[in-house]
Image (tube, rainbow, N blue to C red):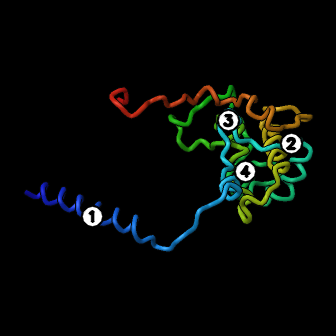
Amino acid sequence: MLRYCFILFLAIAHAAFAEVTQSEPYGLGRPVNSDEIAAWDIDVRPDGLGLPRGMGSVQQGARTYARKCASCHGTNGVEGPFDVLVGRLPGDIFPFARKPGTIKTIGNYWPYTTTIFDYINRAMPFEAPGSLSTGEVYSLVAYLLYRNDIVAADTVLSAENLATIAMPARHRFVPDDRRGGSEVH
């Protein structure tokens, strides 16, 4: 009986909601235009799809880092007071499951360079997230990859080459190809 009452309640609620939304709009919001959608469509995939035009060098990144990042991450990216960004583990070991306290850095944990770009672009600097220019973001990624011994000092990054850089921990991450059915165990 209780199940029947609940199903009846859901049917009545659905019908009432459908009637209100079809006949009496709430008068909230407005349709968005394509420019507004494009402004929010800034995600970047691991394969580089979504990276904006622009470029940045290690040298430019060093200057930007000193001005906009060092106060939170330290002069060399290892001092803090916030997240340590620089550091590799001997032999690129991956002890995070065995030793959960191991510090995760760009050089020993992050699997994709595009994730670094996406995060810096969206969330940094802390006091003004999203305020960096595209060139500053590419430069910072170049500098941080250089500091982690992943790219050379003369590296210039852009949408054309950023996703091609293999991170030391990339092979430690595998795609989750489960599809939500009986194949998920």
Tell me the element at label 3.
loop
Q: Residue furthest bottom?
A: 27
Q: Which residue is located at x 87 percent, y 43 percent?
A: 56
Q: Are marks 1 and 3 in contact (CB under 8 Å)?
A: no
Q: CA distance from mark 2 to mark 1?
A: 54 Å
Q: Which residue is located at x 59 percent, y 63 percent?
A: 31
Q: Earlier in the sequence, mark 2 or mark 1?
A: 1
Q: Is residue 14 above or below residue 167?
A: below
Q: CA distance from mark 2 to mark 3?
A: 18 Å
Q: Nearer the viewer, mark 2 or mark 4?
A: 2
The amino acid type, in three-letter code, at marker 4 is Ile
Residue 15, given in percent of the width and then of the height, sits at: 28, 62
Q: Earlier in the sequence, mark 2 or mark 3?
A: 2
Q: Earlier in the sequence, mark 2 or mark 4?
A: 2
**Residue bearing mark 2:** 55
**Residue bearing mark 1:** 13
The amino acid type, in three-letter code, at marker 1 is Ala
Number of marks present in the image shown: 4
Q: CA distance from mark 2 to mark 4?
A: 15 Å
Where's the C terminus, which quadrant?
top left
Q: Is residue 73 left or right of residue 93?
A: right
**Residue bearing mark 3:** 112
Q: Nearer the viewer, mark 1 or mark 3?
A: 1
Q: Nearer the viewer, mark 2 or mark 3?
A: 2
Q: Which residue is located at x 55 percent, y 37 percent?
A: 96
Q: Nearer the viewer, mark 2 or mark 1?
A: 1
Residue 108, given in percent of the width and then of the height, sits at: 67, 36
Residue 105, given in percent of the width and then of the height, sits at: 68, 42
Q: Are marks 2 and 1 in contact (CB under 8 Å)?
A: no
Q: Is residue 102 left or right of residue 127?
A: left
